[in-house]
Image: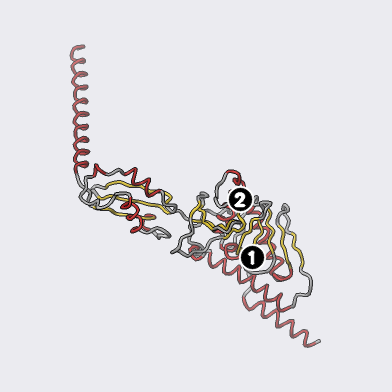
């Protein structure tokens, strides 16, 4: 009985050994067959076949050809150094990720993901560049026109230096927020970086300066400013204040403008506020209208939601104005 059990065990081990050897032989044969096969061509795919922002398939082929990878058709697959080819393509500042491999038809596949910029920076030296959500610096492209948050007064020509790490983090946070919020992306025209590492913002509508303070607690600050716009400025108009300070915790401090604001200017300013809010509501359904950058996840806890606002009809302001004019005439 013991002899029989030993024989069964020996034959089992031998069987598994032969099966493993056969599998290994098949694998080696397949590898040898693939290595001896020839390349049937090249196929480049950018952004999984989606919209291409900056790169050009022809330019990518040219980059590889400059490094000696040309006339690749009918060359042996084993002769390709795919890692070297990947490193060549990674030199392009617009490439976030790249993968090279041969498919079952021996076609060289090149799959590329582009970087997506979130802001345009202007340094104090006058140089300009773009940054993506990871803080990687990129040159400004010649052929592509797109809208991004603009930051001026950046202290260095290079983004990402360790000594500016706190400032860089705040710039990225503000840039990502402005890209994802349809109201503020349309209202904030420029963000200026002051020497004290604080931010002054220039609005599209209104002449006042928004003294934002540093970039900490930015969502709460924008929320407070939005509430101020809706509850105060929608009544008084934009021209009544020269500056709005948000640097103090849980406060909005507005500096009044000297002189008299006409009733017509006040009414028009109120209309501008309401129209801006309506446009933001409309653009929320299509963020592609606002930016050429994919929106990030929204923070529903601290961010002001625009969908539920109870706005007056467009003719409400006109009706109110006409009523006041009639009363004045009666007097």
Which numbered tag is attached to residue 177? none
Instruction: Look at the numbered discs 2 and 1 and tell me whether their residues touch, using CB distance below 8 Å.
Output: no
Q: Judge whether 323 appears above or below 139 on screen.
A: below
Residue 297: % across, % down: 52, 53
Residue 238 is drawn in which quadrant? bottom right
Residue 267: % across, % down: 69, 76
Please name whichever residue, 175 or 279, is drawn nearer the observer in this view of the structure.
175
**Residue positioned 74% across, 70% down in the render:** 240
**Residue positioned 75% across, 59% down in the render:** 253
Marks 2 and 1, how far apart at CA: 19 Å
Q: Judge whether 235 appears above or below 304 on screen.
A: below
For the residue labelled by badge 1, is the local secondary structure a helix, a strand or a loop? strand
Q: What residue is pinned by disc 1?
A: 203
For the residue labelled by badge 2, is the local secondary structure a helix, a strand or a loop? helix
Residue 16: % across, % down: 22, 26
**Residue positioned 30% across, 50% down in the render:** 109
> On the picture, is 320 further left or further right than 278?
right
> On the picture, is 5 further left or further right than 125?
left
Q: What residue is pinned by disc 2?
A: 170
């Amino acid at each position: 009985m013991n002899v029989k059990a030993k024989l069964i065990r020996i034959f089992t081990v031998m069987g598994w050994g032969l099966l493993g050897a056969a599998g290994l032989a098949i694998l080696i044969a397949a590898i040898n067959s693939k290595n001896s096969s020839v390349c049937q061509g090249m196929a480049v795919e950018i952004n999984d076949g989606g919209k291409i922002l900056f790169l050009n398939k022809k330019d990518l082929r040219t980059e590889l050809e400059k490094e000696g990878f040309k006339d690749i058709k009918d060359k042996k697959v084993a002769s390709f150094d795919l890692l070297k080819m990947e490193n060549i393509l990674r030199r392009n500042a617009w490439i976030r990720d790249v993968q090279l491999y041969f498919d079952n038809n021996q076609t060289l596949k090149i799959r590329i993901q582009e970087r997506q910029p979130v802001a345009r920076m202007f340094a104090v030296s006058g140089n300009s560049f773009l940054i993506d959500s990871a803080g990687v610096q990129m040159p400004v492209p010649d052929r592509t026109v797109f809208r991004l948050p603009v930051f001026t007064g950046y202290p260095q020509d290079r983004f990402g230096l360790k000594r500016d790490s706190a400032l860089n983090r705040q710039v990225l946070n503000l840039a990502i927020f402005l890209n994802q919020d349809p109201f503020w992306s349309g209202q904030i025209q420029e963000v200026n970086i002051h020497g004290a590492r604080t931010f002054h913002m220039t609005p599209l509508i209104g002449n006042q300066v928004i003294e934002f303070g540093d970039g900490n607690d930015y969502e709460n600050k924008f929320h407070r400013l939005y509430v101020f716009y809706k509850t105060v400025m929608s009544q008084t108009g934009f021209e009544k204040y020269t500056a709005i300070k948000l640097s103090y915790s849980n406060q909005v401090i507005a500096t009044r403008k000297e002189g008299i604001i006409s009733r017509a200017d006040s009414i028009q300013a109120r209309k501008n506020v309401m129209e801006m809010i309506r446009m933001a509501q409309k653009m929320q359904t299509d963020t592609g209208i606002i930016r050429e950058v994919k929106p990030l996840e929204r923070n529903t806890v601290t961010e002001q939601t625009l969908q539920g606002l109870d706005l007056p009809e467009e003719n409400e302001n006109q009706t109110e104005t006409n009523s006041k004019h009639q009363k004045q005439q009666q007097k």
